[in-house]
């Protein structure tokens, strides 16, 4: 069966649409690719937000979506991180400021849905084919260069399949790629609240009993909360009256923004860790949550996925320029080596923070709490951590400093 597409990306979230837009823009600039995106449904209007790093900003710019995203994104200039055992204004609070590294901000807060919609528009503007439908099955036939894809929109065929279909990835399962999973035994409770005091362009994160509470500043002066707590507590918070919920939120936030008044519905999502044993198989690559899921305490989930998309796009463009097929094993292996190692390091670091600072006890937890204060006194360490939060790493400078690689 001949391939109707060179690359078929399955999954219309921000990571899948970013990869689709990057590849479509490369194709529109001279690389003869046929790129399609299979999207099951429109982005959900669930109010969830993402903190975009500087690296993600540049990726979204290369994908042709940043100009549409920027008017809806709120830049934050400061970050405060502290443990519930210390006061919010004490010297033990870890303080990050954009001015420390000569940056205008530390990142942007924006609704995930806005990012996905802008990327989808950029993909279509670059000539990509958007297909609305759900995956039904994948067939790999020996000797056939194409993977047969049956969907509710009809049958497709592609040389390379990219799974961007989330933690419950059907693509990952169809290609026989196993994933290690573990529950954090927590749920992330998400809501929008109106603070009594100004958020001061600051992202706040407090390690509370059994979890973390993040207060993320929004453009309208409100704050989006991501409150990760044990499952039983999350259910109790969902069932609580608005007044009781707000009282508990005030206590857990250490009243850094005064009273926090609910501005909408509360939602909760179970938290688990996922790590695919492989990121690639013959004629397949995984990106984003299909390959890895981390705890939201550092706000890195979508950012790590966008780095996956940029890495796979860069390697694919370079391979195509060298005359190789999109499913070339050399390209897929290079992608897996690049991204799997970096993602696993971040997974380990985030898990350690969650275990020790959010849920830990005893001497090790006390030592970690003191480490926050020590880090706050070291400009060198703070610069390092700010750099990592911005997404600045030596292995990324090839595309980060020169998005023109898309057009080579």
Image (cartoon, helix red, strand yellow):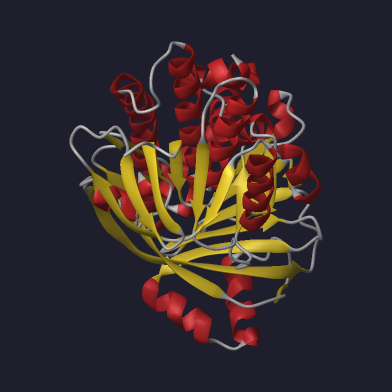
Q: Position of residue 376 (x, y in %)?
A: 58, 35
**Drawn side of residue 291 relative to residue 312, left or right:** left
Q: Position of residue 192 (x, y in %)?
A: 67, 68
Q: Quadrant of the N terminus?
A: top left
Can residue 408 be seen here? The reply is yes
Residue found 57% across the figure and 22% down from its top: 380
Q: Quadrant of residue 242?
A: bottom right
Numbered marks: total: 0
In the depicted structure, whether residue 333 falls above or below residue 361: above
**Drawn side of residue 387 relative to residue 111, left or right:** left
Can residue 402 be seen here? The reply is no
In the depicted structure, whether residue 142 falls above or below residue 221: above
Q: Quadrant of the C terminus?
A: top right
321 or 275, nearer to the observer: 321
Q: Position of residue 174 (x, y in %)?
A: 25, 51
Residue found 20% across the figure and 47% down from its top: 176
328 or 248, nearer to the observer: 328
Q: Position of residue 130 (x, y in %)?
A: 57, 49
322 or 247, nearer to the observer: 322
In the depicted structure, whether residue 145 falls above or below residue 165: above
**Drawn side of residue 140 relative to residue 321, left or right:** left
In the depicted structure, whether residue 362 falls above or below residue 292: below
Most extreme residue toward the left, as rendered? 142
Most extreme residue toward the top, as rendered? 322
Q: Quadrant of residue 136?
A: bottom left
């Amino acid at each position: 069966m001949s391939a109707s597409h060179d690359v078929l990306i399955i999954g219309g979230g921000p990571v899948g649409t970013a990869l689709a837009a990057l590849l479509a823009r490369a194709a529109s600039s001279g690389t003869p690719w046929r790129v399609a995106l299979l999207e099951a449904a429109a982005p959900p209007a669930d109010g969830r937000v993402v903190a975009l790093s500087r690296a993600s900003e540049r990726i979204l710019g290369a994908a042709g979506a940043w100009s549409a995203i920027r008017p809806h994104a709120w830049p934050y200039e400061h970050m405060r991180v502290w443990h519930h055992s210390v006061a919010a204004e004490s010297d033990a609070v870890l303080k990050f400021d954009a001015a420390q590294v000569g940056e205008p901000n530390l990142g942007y807060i924006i609704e995930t849905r806005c990012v996905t919609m802008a990327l989808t528009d950029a993909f279509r503007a670059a000539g990509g084919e958007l297909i609305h439908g759900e995956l039904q099955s994948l067939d790999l036939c020996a000797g056939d260069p194409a993977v047969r894809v049956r969907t509710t929109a009809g049958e497709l065929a592609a040389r390379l399949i990219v799974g961007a279909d989330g933690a419950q990835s059907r693509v990952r399962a169809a290609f026989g790629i196993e994933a290690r999973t573990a529950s954090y035994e927590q749920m992330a409770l998400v809501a929008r609240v109106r603070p009594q005091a100004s958020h001061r362009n600051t992202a706040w994160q407090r390690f509370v009993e059994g979890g973390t509470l993040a207060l993320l500043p929004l453009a309208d002066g409100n704050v989006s909360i991501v409150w990760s707590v044990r499952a039983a507590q999350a259910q109790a918070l969902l069932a609580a009256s608005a007044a009781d919920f707000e009282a508990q939120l005030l206590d857990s936030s250490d009243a850094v923004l005064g009273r926090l008044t609910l501005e909408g519905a509360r939602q909760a999502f179970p938290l688990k860790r996922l790590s695919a044993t492989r990121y690639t198989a013959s004629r397949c690559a995984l990106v984003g949550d299909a390959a890895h899921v981390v705890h939201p305490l550092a706000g890195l989930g979508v950012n790590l996925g966008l780095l996956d998309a940029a890495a796979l796009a860069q390697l694919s463009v370079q391979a195509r320029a060298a005359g190789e097929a999109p499913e070339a094993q050399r390209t897929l292996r290079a992608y897996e080596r690049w991204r799997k190692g970096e993602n696993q390091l971040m997974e380990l670091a985030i898990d350690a923070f969650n275990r020790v600072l959010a849920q830990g006890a005893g001497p090790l937890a006390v030592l970690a709490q003191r480490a926050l204060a020590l880090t706050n006194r070291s400009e060198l360490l703070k610069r390092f951590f700010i750099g990592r939060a911005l997404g600045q790493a030596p292995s990324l400078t090839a595309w980060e400093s020169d998005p023109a690689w898309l057009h080579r």
